[in-house]
Amino acid sequence: MVELTIDGIKTRVSEGTTVLEAASEMGITIPTLCYYPGLSCYGECRVCLVEVVKGDRSSLEASCTLPVEQGQVILTDSEKARKVRKVIVELLLASCPNSKTLQDMAANMGINKVRFKIKDRGCILCGRCVRYCKEQMKSGGIGFVGRGTSRRVATAFDVTPEECRNCGGCEWICPVNERACMAGNLIDGLCGGCQNLAPVETCPVCTGCSESVGPQGHRVYK
């Protein structure tokens, strides 16, 4: 067993466990995109960055590929980690502005504007579909093609291979396949609708009368 400290709480986990898995066992949620249970860890999107403290110094590392170590000190929600995550999500939104997953993530992080040039590529190159096709379907019909800004997911020579089973798994597992509710009508690359929702609290004496107390005072829902 390995003992480490995550967000000030000491815990013990089995050797070989990743920091992401250790945090999850403690009920700590770390945002992820390229990670998916049952698939090999890839560490491509970097959204799951955590701060690893080493004395008076620290570094940011992808928690999905970072194995636990004895005496390790991890901060999952430090200001340093949050700041870099927000920039990463902004960059990903610039590539996939119509993704519901990314728009939801941006709302949760309090991102109010995408500061990078938006060019919808429809893919963040997270590799989920490639790994699913190879590791779960045992096909390997799709893969990465090209390099740099030309890199994309495709079949060899853009021809559907015989190995493809037409299972649809590549679309099902894609984290950016679902379109945002405001897709096509974004402002500064963002939907922003979820950030405009006003909190609603039930009144102190709840009798199931469908009444609530919100920012505008007492209201009855019919």
Image (tube, rainbow, N blue to C red):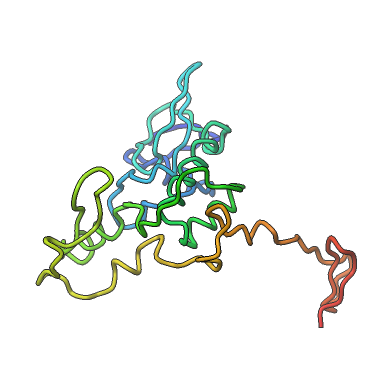
Residue 154 vs 41, above or below: the answer is below
Q: Specify the quadrant of the image occupied by residue 168.
A: bottom left
Question: Where is residue 94 drawn, in percent x and y?
Answer: 44, 50
Q: Residue furthest bottom?
A: 222
Question: Where is residue 160 drawn, in percent x and y?
Answer: 14, 70
Residue at 16% from the left image edge and 71% from the top image edge: 164
Task: Point out the image quarter for the C terminus.
Answer: bottom right
Task: Point out the image quarter for the N terminus.
Answer: top left
Residue at 36% from the left image edge and 62% from the top image edge: 174
- In the rendered structure, the answer to whether residue 184 lies left or right of residue 155 reads right
Residue 182 vs 1, above or below: the answer is below
Who is closer to the viewer here, 110 or 8?
A: 110
Q: Residue furthest left?
A: 162
Who is closer to the viewer here, 67 or 165?
A: 165
Residue 209 vs 150, above or below: the answer is below
Task: Report the label total.
Answer: 0
Residue at 21% from the left image edge and 75% from the top image edge: 166
Residue at 61% from the left image edge and 57% from the top image edge: 192
Q: Specify the quadrant of the image occupied by residue 210.
A: bottom right
Q: Specify the quadrant of the image occupied by residue 60.
A: top left
- In the rendered structure, the answer to whether residue 142 lies left or right of residue 75 reads left
Question: Where is residue 218 drawn, in percent x and y?
Answer: 90, 68
- In the rendered structure, the answer to whether residue 107 lies left or right of residue 149 reads right
Who is closer to the viewer here, 6 or 182?
A: 182
Q: Residue furthest top?
A: 56
Who is closer to the viewer here, 176 or 167?
A: 176
Question: Where is residue 209 drawn, in percent x and y?
Answer: 85, 79
